[in-house]
Image (cartoon, rainbow, N blue to C red):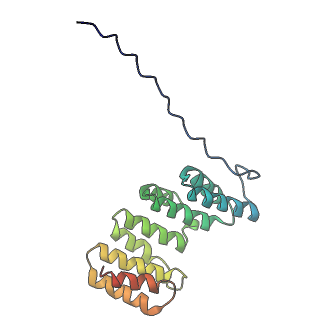
Amino acid sequence: RRQRAPAAPAPVVKPVAPPAPTLPPGIPPAGMLSPQQAQNVIESARAAALRNDVPAALLLYRRARASSQADIALVEELRLLRIRNRAGEGLGVIAGLPAELRSDAVRIEHGRLLLASNRANEAMTVIAEIRRTSPQAQEALLLIGDSLHAQGQKDQARKVWTAVEKAGGDQAQPARDRLAAGR
């Protein structure tokens, strides 16, 4: 019998870390942003999200929080985390927010993150804080219907969705879709 030569060791392949996300040219790393700088940061964040560069998008959204675009940046950041199945991280962001940044639009996303985390009761509490006169009121009602449905209260959910549909506006079609789906 012939002896086999020992196999050569497999080459060690070191993983290449992706480059660290950076701010666009002309954007200072700290401090308030001018309105134009804020808009550039938001647009850069959206572009990063579209090319699936979530770390860069998150960095940019967080940088835009120190600007006149803070509410838009925060809502889009939370939405990105929810869409990317990172609801826990989004809830962590909300937990660290000062009260003045908890707008009705942020409450809507907070409710969605809670629903995505199977925490329908908590979502109801957050969504109920939205003012009835708020532009987000109908969207809040739609999410209340979703929360009721998630809790097994299907008849109540249908009643809420029906009310949203009858009110018209931007949320009428999503309510109609939920009713048609027999949810």
Q: Which quadrant is the N terminus positioned in?
A: top left
- Residue at the image point whose x is 54% and y is 68% from the top: 102
Q: Nearer the viewer, residue 99 or 48?
A: 48
Give residue 110's position: percent from left, percent from top.
46, 67
Give residue 42's position: percent from left, percent from top.
65, 62
- Residue at the image point whose x is 74% and y is 65% from the top: 35
139 displayed left or right of 43: left
Give residue 132's position: percent from left, percent from top.
49, 85
- Residue at the image point whose x is 27% and y is 85% from the top: 155
**Does residue 122 appear anywhere in the picture?**
yes
Q: Nearer the viewer, residue 94 or 160?
A: 160
**Does residue 98 appear anywhere in the picture?**
no
Q: Quadrant of residue 73?
A: bottom right
Q: Residue furthest front?
A: 1
Q: Nearer the viewer, residue 163 or 45?
A: 45
63 displayed left or right of 118: right
Q: Which quadrant is the C terminus positioned in?
A: bottom left
Q: Residue furthest bottom?
A: 166
Q: Exactly how many numbered labels are in the figure?
A: 0
Q: Nearer the viewer, residue 132 or 179?
A: 179
Give residue 16's position: percent from left, percent from top.
54, 35
Q: Residue furthest left?
A: 1
- Residue at the image point whose x is 62% and y is 59% from the top: 47
